[in-house]
Amino acid sequence: MTPPPSQKQSPSVTQDLVPAGVINFRNVDLQIVATIYAQVIGRELEKTAPFPSDVINIKTQTPLTKQEACYALETLFNWSGAKIVLVRDDLIRVVPMSGDDSGK
């Protein structure tokens, strides 16, 4: 169903949307999801640090903004006992929730 013209989003807003179902991870390794997450936010993933092992399961049912998609993935990392830490402006690391998150 197409929304009426008054409710349509501007092109700049719709370009930032991730269509429903595009995020579809079924038992995908946490490191692979973290690599994709890093690409979405315009950074690289540091792969030399010890990496928590787990899998992610998510399939989006509605369109999400880039910010909402990142929040959803961050939440899933947290549920897996991991979190994203900014190491430098261009680099992130995934660490265990109880691990050192100083980025140093």
Image (cartoon, helix red, strand yellow):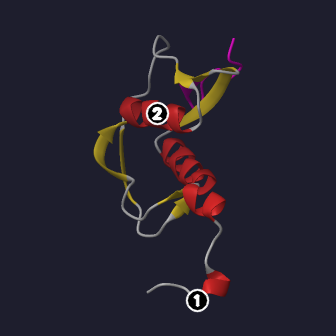
Of residues 17 and 61, which is closer to you in this image?
Answer: 17
Looking at the rendering, the stretch of residues picked out in magenta corresponds to 93-104
- The quarter of the picture where the N terminus appears is bottom left
Q: Which residue lies at the image location 49% right of the left edge and 48% below the top edge?
A: 76
As for residue 96 lying within the magenta part, the answer is: yes
Q: Is residue 97 visible?
A: no
On screen, residue 19 versus residue 75, left or right, reads left
**Disc 2 to disc 1, C-alpha distance:** 38 Å
Of residues 4 and 55, which is closer to you in this image?
Answer: 4
* Rendered image quadrant of residue 98: top right
How many numbered dots are placed on residues in this image?
A: 2
Q: Is residue 91 visible?
A: yes
As for residue 22 lying within the magenta part, the answer is: no
Identify the residue under disc 2.
Answer: 34
Identify the residue under disc 1.
Answer: 4
Q: Secondary structure at mark 2?
A: helix
